[in-house]
Amino acid sequence: MYNIKRITSDIMDEFSQKIEYAKHSFIPMLPFVKMPFHNFDIYKSYSDRGLFLIDYLDEGYCLYHLYHINKGDDTLRATLILPSSWDKRFEIVEKSIPNIKEWFLNEDSSKKFIIQSLEYGEIEYYPTLSHYLIPTIIRNGFEPEYRMYMKRSLSLPFDEVHGLEEGLELLGYSEDILEDIINFYYKDESAKNPMYFSNCPYDELTELIRQDFTINNAKFIKTAKGDIIAGVIPSLDSGKLWLDNFTVHPDYDKDNISQFLLRETLLHLSTSCSEETVYIYLNRGCHKEIASCAGNSFVPFEFWVDMTFQRKI
């Protein structure tokens, strides 16, 4: 039986002391990496949005910070996995991951539990726990999903691409197509195959789509019947320009839709905003979308693994 205790506001001082110990002992965190400018102190204050846990083991302990994006979000995510000893980090993680999984099954009501880990990136990080965590977590029943970050400069030239086939139309966001957008990303089961990728939950997307920047820059493609079959939703996050939810319906994957949609979005952004670099987050299984990004001068710079445990209903 696991010995996991929830850290509440009245015992945060104990947690803060352990974070201080970790800062000075060079113990890595997930999904972050140990670098001088990282703000470990954000975990020394209590927040109702985050869930703090400590798993007591014979070898020491493992600290966790878990969170939901917003109220009603059905996915629990791990922000912090912190073993208490660098020398025994592998033994601690090996024994603690089954415990946190059992805790999730018994004491949390979320449908999914995601632990994300950096596989490779431009950033230099302290000798990694991540490479050990990935197979350990997968052995405990988590399904891996392989993600990738790409980037390009908006000042680069744009290649010519063929226009859309007859019956397809490029359009920007408007309130009257919101229901069609939601249907495409969240309700159309025919779109949800291994090539399908949407990187935010429903509540987050509906919040994102109401932002002025997104309203003015989002692009979609619809059929003559009015069905949305492709979309890309730009956003600004911490001063960076992102292309979110770049998705093409698999029935249209054979066409040049993804490359056309991406080019038109980039052309529009190059005149509507001042950011020099644009970033995109993709499922590495979305081969057509990745090829379209490469064809539009995007280059990969970080590779991640989302390890997901799905609760059986």
Image: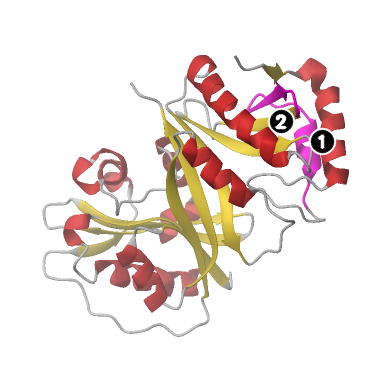
Quarter of the figure that contains the N terminus = top right
Q: Is residue 52 magenta?
A: yes
State the residue at coordinates (48%, 38%).
139
Residue 209 visible: no
Q: Residue at x 59, y 24 (%)?
A: 99
* Disc sitting over residue 19 in the figure: 1
Quarter-of-image position of residue 23: top right
How many numbered callouts? Answer: 2
Q: Residue at x 23, y 79 (%)?
A: 162
Magenta span covers which residues?
Answer: 38-59
What SS does tag 1 mark?
A: helix
Mark linked to residue 102: none
Callout 2: SS: strand
Task: Decide which of tag 2 and tag 1 comes sooner along the chain.
Answer: 1
Q: Is residue 215 visible?
A: yes
Marks 2 and 1, how far apart at CA? 9 Å
**Nearest to the observer: residue 108 or residue 24:** 24
Give the percent coordinates (x, y) of residue 293.
40, 71
Coordinates of residue 49 in the picture (x, y in percent): 63, 28
Q: Position of residue 82 (x, y in %)?
A: 71, 37
Which is more toward the observer, 77 or 245? Answer: 77
Disc 2: which residue: 63
The reply to whether discs 2 and 1 touch (Cβ–Cβ < 8 Å) is yes
| Horizontal side, residue 151 vs residue 176: left or right | right
User: Which of these two is toward me, 202 or 132?
Assistant: 132
Q: Amino acid at mark 1?
A: Ile
Q: Residues within 10 Å of mark 2 (few under 14, many from 20)?
A: many
Up the image or down, 126 lies above or below 192; here it is below
Q: Amino acid at mark 2?
A: Leu
Q: Which residue is more in the foreground, 224 or 192?
A: 192
Q: How is the image coloured?
A: secondary structure
